[in-house]
Image (cartoon, rainbow, N blue to C red):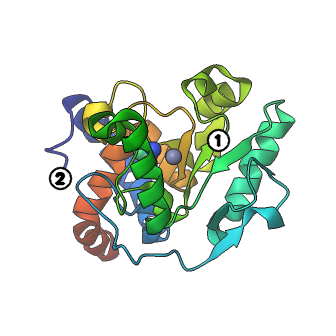
Amino acid sequence: MTASLPPAIQQAITAKPDAFLRLLSEVLAQPADLFVLVDKKHPLPSGFVPPDLVSLNDYPVLVTRKDLKLRRSIMPAVLALTDAAAAAGAPLTFGSSYRSYDYQVTVYENEVKLYGREQADRESARPGLSQHQLGTAMDFSPIADTFADTKQGKWLAAHAWEYGFSLSYPEGYENVTGYKHESWHYRYVTKPGALLQREYFGDIQQYMIEFLDRNRAVLEKELERK
Ligand code: DAL
Ligand code: ZN
């Protein structure tokens, strides 16, 4: 099951197999739709719309625009994250959140117009290929490389996992994720998910989500039997 993972990650798993399986079974008990694999090879259906979108205007959070939405089911975690960041002196502002298939058409085509298709494909997902369509991914403001050096960027890099959030496009992994480093883009993967990613998958979301996608059916059967 671990054969396609980098050797260091295989070792992390095989060094502590019981602890790995315990945490893994906690992750498998979380809603599977929080772990859907969406990348350049795994599109969402164009008609996919999350079932429980809510407006961020109805919550005590900071936004750069009034049309932002996320899934209702993740809002308790979102508020825990934003409250903790604010308490630490790094108040977070949402710059982007759920994006429909049609809106992603606009976002992607704009990038192509501005930078050309080759560059656009390194930083913007084609329609149907964006985590933003899940309603569980978000960009914090400013959406810019400078975000990494802000109080907010540093606080998130150190603490987002404690609240169940993970950086989707880390530095140095473009060949794995398909995208350049985005210090501002986080996806909610639940607390046990973020811990599993950190402890066993080199803190690389792509490795964990691919592993779960590939092995979920078999693992669920195995763990049921135990
Ligand atoms: N910027 C990320 C890759 C997206 O467009 O979903
Ligand atoms: Zn994003």
What amino acid is labelled 2 in the image?
Answer: Met
- Residue 23: x and y in percent read 44, 53
Badge 2 density bin: few <14, some 14–19, many ≥20, Cα 10 Å: few
State the residue at coordinates (36%, 73%): 46
State the residue at coordinates (74%, 47%): 64
SS under mark 2: loop
Mark 2, residue position: 1
Instruction: Write down the quadrant of residue 90 in the picture.
Output: top right
What amino acid is labelled 1 in the image?
Answer: Phe
Q: Quadrant of the C terminus?
A: bottom left
Instruction: Write down the quadrant of residue 86 in the picture.
Output: top right
SS under mark 1: strand
Question: Which residue occupies the foreground of this view, 172 or 43?
Answer: 43
State the residue at coordinates (34%, 45%): 206
Q: Is residue 202 visible?
A: no
Badge 1 density bin: few <14, some 14–19, many ≥20, Cα 10 Å: many
Which of disc 1 and disc 2 is earlier in sequence?
A: 2
Question: Which residue occupies the foreground of this view, 221 or 100?
Answer: 100
Question: Which residue occupies the foreground of this view, 51 or 220?
Answer: 51
Q: Is residue 19 above or below residue 182?
A: below
Q: Is residue 41 left or right of residue 139?
A: left
Q: Which mark is residue 140?
A: 1
Depth check, mark 2 against mark 1: the one in front is 1
- Residue 146: x and y in percent read 60, 22
Question: Which residue occupies the foreground of this view, 155 or 60?
Answer: 60
Q: CA distance from mark 2 to mark 1?
A: 35 Å
Total numbered labels placed on residues in the image: 2
Q: Is residue 219 visible?
A: yes
